[in-house]
Image: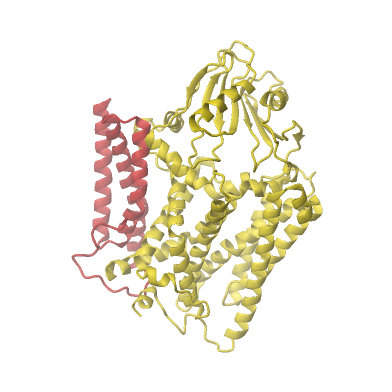
Amino acid sequence: MTTPASPPASSRRPRPPRRGGGAPPGGRLHVLARVLAAIVGTYALAWGFGALGAVAGTWLGMAPAEATTLFALLALSAMPGIALWALAAGRVMRVWAVLALGALVQIALAYLVRGAGA
Amino acid sequence: MSKALRAALLWPHTWMGVTLGGLLIVIFFMGSLTVFMPEIDRWMMPATRVAMPGAPVSVDAIARPLLEQLTAQRAAGGATVRDWLVEMPDARTPVLQLRVRTSAGGAGMMATADGRRLPPPGTLGASSFFYPLHYCLLLRPGFIGYWIVALAAVAMMAGLVSGVVIHARIFQDFFTFRLRAHPQRSLLDLHNLMGVLALPFHLMITFSGIVIVLPVVFPAGTTLLYAGDMNRFYAEAVGNYDRPAVGAAAPLLPLDPLVDRARRLWAAETGRDVAVAQVGVVHPGDAGAYVRITRLNDDRVTLHNDPLYFDGVTGTLLARGRPGPVVGAQRFIAGLHEVHFDHWTLRWLYFLQGLGGCVLIATGLLYWLEKRRVRHDGRGWRAVAATACATTTGVVLATLAMMVANRLLPAALPSRELAEVAVFFGVWIGTAAHADLHLRRHPDPPWRAHAGLVGGLALVAMAANWITTGDHPIHAWAEGHGAVLGVDGALAVTALVAFFAAWRLEGGRAKARPGGARSGQTLAITPMEAKNG
């Protein structure tokens, strides 16, 4: 199952959709923040995972091309789920915090591990 | 699954569909056509409707003289030859395709299995137009088209996953299709039915499609481990062999014995008679020449073509491209997408489920349009309605118009292949403009006019093929031109379905108008309410 691990909006009771089923919650800026999180944030988080996995896999003895491909495939499988979580989860600020922090930490670690290995 | 989660996922599902649905329909439609790419190529390139050679074609006797001709033409001013490539004929593409690359540019040609050089086809055909439109929208600079298609594909996967979550009563609704119900209700039924029926295929085809271009659109590992050098990554991943030219001349060995050795090697390993797909020579005539022979994958799923590298002067087996287990899995997933294996039932299932993807997305768009009609009766609504029309009937019209142009444009027309492309895009833009103008004065896109035109153009394309090539069904049957019969048959079915749709739309309008109740006003079913009800 690729759905988000935790059901969103656990702290607050979800508001019923204001304007019928398919309307996005909040104003335009809010929607923009969501969409950017779903596209850019998801990609950055997945990119970090792919990079860190490739470097760590190589460090652990995998062939570089194998590790690169393995973690690219895993990152791709996770992307739709992460994007949906970014769109549906309770607070958009928390979404951005998780995505940005996750991406930065993984990318930083990836460069550190590569530096240590080389 | 909780009600809150379903509610939270509804708007992403809706808005991904509304913003990227049109693009995804085009990608799915062109991908479906690509399943039968060789057959459409035979239809669009009548000179290649030749019989498949009975015996394996000799590379030395047939291909090499033609390659030397091409080289002499290209390298007349003292340019050096980089490589030769021969695509061997197979059952679906019964001609040889030859390519030469020199420091002064490349040249290519097609030839029959008995060595007759064919004139330039004057068309891009399915292989150089519908296919690249499918995977990169013909936007190659900076791989921009690959990125757009991959983004749409990830949205498609997210749309499928969120659709399953939203749509909780999967099993029950699988048996629900209220064709005679209110149009809005039957649109949603069809959307749900198609989504569930073809869900495994759609997940597989979307995922595997991105997997093919993954190193391009997801260069994470390659950035860190290969300094962003994608070619070096590819070469290492699949085990490519390369070496530079020496600069001293040396005669190239006969190639047929090397082809025989490759086939014997594959036969010993697989226990089957494996056909050769390509024979390439790098640095021909140089002491550093090497020969690359790949296999046809008509007997297995993977795209890995098992290249064998022979020394072009001594004949030693230099290397063998062998990917590791993960890259092997990646090649397998890519092969799932590209259906090179010889299985007609599966090819038709891919084709039909691909079109099912178009129906899935189009019914979703139409459902949205019906539901939002009252609320958004403005410019935004009209833009989505016109887009929905241009990416469904519009893209079919453009395709059919291109096929008609392919048969009717004079062979001597300069840049004939570009004229065909101009017809495609001209008609496509025309359908969008027509839909927009129509929507200014009518509540619905011009479905009936478009359906009638689709039927008419399909018949014209079929008739044009019979008249300009003489390949009417009896002739095609007698000559064994199955590809032509198949494409003509598909055109006939298209015409029937389109005329039937046009007729039904006429009847539907006559019945619905007197009541005056426009859909969307009478019933405001949201998917949530529908499920609870």
Q: Residue at x 65, y 36 (%)?
A: B89
In the image, is B430 to the left or to the right of B116? left
Q: Nearer the viewer, residue A39 or B451?
A: B451
Query: Which chain comes out red in the rendered image?
Result: A
Taking the view exactly as shown, the residue that stands out farthest to the bottom is: B515
Could you say where residue B41 lies in the image, as x and y percent from the top left? 67, 46
Picture quarter with the C terminus of chain B:
bottom left
**Residue A26 in sight:** no
User: How was the colour assigned to the protein in this rendering?
Assistant: by chain
Q: In which quadrant of the rendered view does residue B259 lie?
A: top right
**Residue B76 in sight:** yes
Could you say where residue B411 lies in the image, as x and y percent from the top left? 79, 45
In the image, is A27 to the left or to the right of B294? left
For the image, the number of numbered tags is: 0
Picture quarter with the N terminus of chain B:
bottom left
In the image, is B177 to the left or to the right of A32? right
Taking the view exactly as shown, the residue that stands out farthest to the left is: A11
Determine whether B393 is above or below B306 in the image: below
Taking the view exactly as shown, the residue that stands out farthest to the front is: B271
Could you say where residue B10 lies in the image, as x and y percent from the top left? 36, 67
Q: Residue at x 32, y 63 (%)?
A: A30
Determine whether B218 is above or below B99 in the image: below
Could you say where residue B37 lies in the image, as x and y percent from the top left? 62, 48
Q: In which quadrant of the rendered view does residue B55 lie?
A: top right
Q: Nearer the viewer, residue B486 or B123?
A: B486
In the image, is A81 to the left or to the right of B444? left
Query: Which chain comes out yellow in the rendered image?
Result: B
Q: Residue at x 60, y 24 (%)?
A: B260
